[in-house]
Image (spheres, helix red, strand yellow):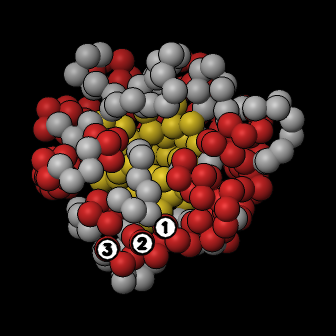
């Protein structure tokens, strides 16, 4: 296992959206996503991720302020490419912003951002974020066209959508696509992250891809925490990643 921060080390960012999902089911004040962030960090998380959706279905604006007050690790804000979200990011100045697609009718993000559709709009967003001193990432499918366009747009990093891999267990093609696109992105000078649908049971083959340097994992951590607590859920995932690496 590589040492934290050293060559070959695979970072684990915990997405705490679904702590807020539980809270919003009753529109009360618990569980608190910021408190969850602190516990995740203490258990070994290398960073915290949260998605402020336009409909505010889970994370709320006040949660972002609270998280930034208590977090001691880098904070990655996921958001749609809209003027409202860009203004929020410019005010908060998180360590990183990951631009993601967003549709109101979806339960969760169903695929990567198609960066070939409105490249000028995405480029403008990346430029605004970089001007505010914010590192940028694009959440995209494992598709060579998306890799090449992301590099052309000037983002610092990409996050490969692992949903197809997770939904088709045993299909070598989906894993090969992740592996090939991770290599292609690294060759283009991009940092490579990955996430969506990963669990302790399926994370191993993705964690073993050496070109990937960071995983963003959330729903399974919150689900597992119902039974073992959030700290142990983070530790279980960390062990599974390290065993594969």
Disc 2: which residue: 240
Judging from the image, what secondary structure is the residue with disc 2 in? helix
Q: Nearer the viewer, residue 52 or 228?
A: 228
Q: Is residue 88 above or below residue 229?
A: above
Point 60% across, 58% down: residue:
224
Q: Is residue 203 above or below residue 101?
A: below
Q: Earlier in the sequence, mark 3 or mark 1?
A: 1
Residue 71 in view (yes/no) = no
- Residue 86 picture quarter: top right
Looking at the image, residue 77 sits to the left or right of residue 101; the answer is: right
Judging from the image, what secondary structure is the residue with disc 3 in? helix
Residues at circles 1 and 2 in contact by the CB criterion of under 8 Å = yes
The circle on residue 244 is 3
Q: Nearer the viewer, residue 186 or 174?
A: 174
Where residue 203 appears, x then y in whole percent?
A: 36, 61
Where residue 106 appears, x then y in whole percent?
A: 48, 22
**Mark 3 and mark 2: Cα distance apart in space:** 6 Å
The circle on residue 237 is 1
Where residue 116 appears, x then y in whole percent?
A: 22, 22
The circle on residue 159 is none
Where residue 53 appears, x then y in whole percent?
A: 58, 27
Looking at the image, residue 216 sits to the left or right of residue 165; the answer is: right
Judging from the image, what secondary structure is the residue with disc 1 in? helix
């Amino acid at each position: 296992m590589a040492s934290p921060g050293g060559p070959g080390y695979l970072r684990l960012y915990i997405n705490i959206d679904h702590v807020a999902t539980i809270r919003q089911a009753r529109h009360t004040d618990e569980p608190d996503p910021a408190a969850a962030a602190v516990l995740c960090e203490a258990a070994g998380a290398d960073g915290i991720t949260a998605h402020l959706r336009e409909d505010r279905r889970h994370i709320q604006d006040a949660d972002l302020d609270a998280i930034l007050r208590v977090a001691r690790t880098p904070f990655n804000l996921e958001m749609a490419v809209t003027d409202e979200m860009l203004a929020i990011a410019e005010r908060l100045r998180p360590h990183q912003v990951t631009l993601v697609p967003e549709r109101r009718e979806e339960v969760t993000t169903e695929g990567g951002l198609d960066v070939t559709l409105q490249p000028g709009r995405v480029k403008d967003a990346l430029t605004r974020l970089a001007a505010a001193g914010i590192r940028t990432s694009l959440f995209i499918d494992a598709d060579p066209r998306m890799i090449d366009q992301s590099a052309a747009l000037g983002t610092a990093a990409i996050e490969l959508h692992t949903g197809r891999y997770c939904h088709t267990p045993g299909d070598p093609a989906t894993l090969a696509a992740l592996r090939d696109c991770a290599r292609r992105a690294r060759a283009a000078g991009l940092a490579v992250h990955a996430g969506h649908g990963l669990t302790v049971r399926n994370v191993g083959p993705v964690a073993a891809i050496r070109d990937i340097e960071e995983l963003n994992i959330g729903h399974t951590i919150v689900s597992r925490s119902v039974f073992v607590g959030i700290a142990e859920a983070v530790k279980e995932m960390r062990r599974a990643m390290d065993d594969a690496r």
